[in-house]
Image: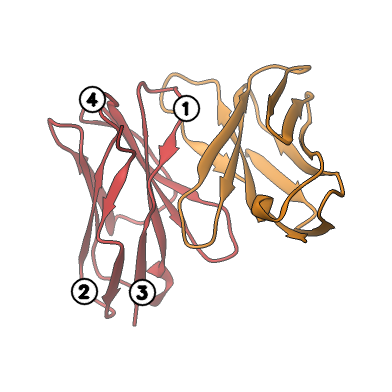
Amino acid sequence: EDQVTQSPEALRLQEGESSSLNCSYTVSGLRGLFWYRQDPGKGPEFLFTLYSAGEEKEKERLKATLTKKESFLHITAPKPEDSATYLCAVQKNTGANSKLTFGKGITLSVRP
Amino acid sequence: DAGVTQSPTHLIKTRGQQVTLRCSPISGHKSVSWYQQVLGQGPQFIFQYYEKEERGRGNFPDRFSARQFPNYSSELNVNALLLGDSALYLCASSSGLQETQYFGPGTRLLVL
């Protein structure tokens, strides 16, 4: 069965203190790994898709990387507005449907 | 361009009642997926529709049903509501079956 595990569950950083969020996955036939950001009471906002091991993508202070077993979301010099829950999801390589299997998320709090 | 829209934003029902949730995809998107997100958990896949056909169903009871209309909008129906159905219901749309899914703001359902 497909499994996505995110760690830590919660992370508190000081503004400017860089860190990494981890997403470990087990899936047969990975088509893509997705990162979303979710603010309280709102829908997830798409950040990145990674398709193959070694791939990296960047957006402002965020950088996502992918290996065959895990993905990291690196946050460089975070600001308070980066506070949110970060969700990781995997999609299988099947033509039937494109369901996303999510982890529980990592709640990031950045203090000014 | 308008994103995914969902209605209503909030809903309160009592046990045993039925509820219908609505979703309008991003213009040009032909696939709609539904997810349930319980507090503190990641979203769980319920259904995916593509070109008005069901393409995937998650591990939810038959009380849950959905359909997609010719204009690609979608409805999720839940019958015989239980307390455990209280959750944020998310709709996501994508341009194709295996393209990136973009989420709406969700409908918060509370069952009393």
Q: Amino acid at mark 2?
A: Gln
Subunit of label 2:
B
Camera-side residue of A1 and A53: A53
Q: Are marks 4 and 3 in contact (CB under 8 Å)?
A: no
Residue underneath mark 2: B17
Residue beneath disc 1: B100
Same chain? Circles 1 and 3? yes
The label nearer to you, 4 versus 1, is 1
- Residue behind mark 3: B110
Mark 4 to mark 2 CA distance (whole Å): 30 Å
Label 4 close to label 1 by CB (< 8 Å): no
- For this orientation, the residue located farthest to the left is B70
Q: Amino acid at mark 1?
A: Thr
Name the residue located 26 percent from the left edge and 46 percent from the top edge: B23
Which of the chains is red? B
Q: Which secondary structure lies at badge 1?
A: loop
Real-space Cα distance between discs 4 and 1?
Answer: 16 Å
The C terminus of chain A lies in quadrant: bottom right
Q: Is residue B54 left or right of residue B44?
A: left
Q: Residues within 10 Å of mark 1 (few under 14, many from 20)?
A: some
Give the colour of chain A.
Answer: orange
Tell which tag, 3 or 2, sits nearer the viewer. Answer: 3
Q: Nearer the viewer, mark 1 or mark 2?
A: 1
Q: Which residue is mark 4?
A: B51
Q: Is residue A105 visible?
A: no
